[in-house]
Image: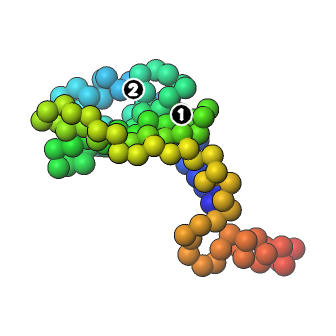
């Protein structure tokens, strides 16, 4: 699981760096899909992901890859109110080999592969 989450964070980082800046995607012509994943305003030190929840709110997730911390905010589109929903240091999460995964577990698959050698 650690590899999966680490890969996800690296993938998000690469995607965010390669996509047009946050301000352009917030333009009225941008579709909700265009706003689903965006890079933070040109900063490789902080990644921003935006998702239109469809209920009048926008969810923004900020990821600090250096400190391995993520924060989730909800923005009320009508009022502009910003609410912090969650903050988590994922450093220890990334050290878990597998969690909440279906069978077979990664260690079982590895054992099967080693038996085939």
User: Which residue is more in the foreground, 117 or 40?
Assistant: 40
Question: Which quadrant, please, contains the C terminus?
Answer: bottom right
Q: Which mark is residue 15?
A: none
From the viewer's perspective, tell me whether residue 57 is left or right of residue 12.
left
Can I make out residue 80 in this image?
yes
Residue at 60% x, 79% y is 103
The residue indicated by pointer 1 is 64
- Residue at x 40%, y 46% (from the top left corner): 86
Residue 82 appears left or right of 44: left
Q: Position of residue 39 (x, y in %)?
A: 43, 30
Q: Nearer the viewer, residue 100 or 7?
A: 100
Classify mark 2: residues with Cα within 10 Å, few (<14), some (14-19) or many (20+).
some
Q: Residues within 10 Å of mark 1 (few under 14, many from 20)?
A: some
The part of the image, by quadrant, that contains residue 56 is top left
Q: Quadrant of residue 84?
A: top left
Q: Is residue 89 above or below residue 62?
A: below
The residue at 64%/65% (across/down) is 98
Picture quarter with the N terminus: bottom right
Query: On the image, which quarter does residue 114 sit in?
Result: bottom right
Whether residue 4 sits left or right of residue 41 in the image: it is: right
Q: Residue 69: x, y in percent?
A: 54, 39
Q: Say which element carries label 2.
A: loop
CA gap between label 2 and label 1 equals 19 Å
Residue 8 position, x and y percent, is 55, 48
Farthest residue in the left direction? 78
Question: In the displayed structure, would residue 92 be above or below residue 96?
Answer: above
Q: Earlier in the sequence, mark 2 or mark 1?
A: 2
Q: Which mark is residue 20?
A: 2
The residue lying furthest to the right in this view is: 117
Q: Is residue 6 left or right of residue 55?
A: right
Q: Position of residue 21 (x, y in %)?
A: 38, 24
């Amino acid at each position: 699981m650690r590899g999966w989450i680490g890969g996800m964070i690296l993938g998000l980082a690469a995607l965010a760096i390669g996509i047009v800046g946050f301000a352009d995607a917030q333009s009225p012509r941008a579709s909700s899909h265009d706003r689903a994943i965006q890079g933070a305003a040109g900063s490789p030190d902080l990644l921003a992901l935006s998702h239109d929840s469809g209920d009048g709110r926008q969810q923004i997730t900020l990821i600090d890859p250096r400190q391995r911390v993520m924060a989730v905010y909800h923005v009320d589109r009508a009022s502009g109110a910003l609410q912090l929903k969650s903050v988590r240091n994922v450093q220890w999460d990334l050290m878990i080999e597998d969690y909440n995964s279906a069978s077979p577990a990664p260690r079982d698959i590895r054992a099967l592969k080693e038996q085939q050698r």
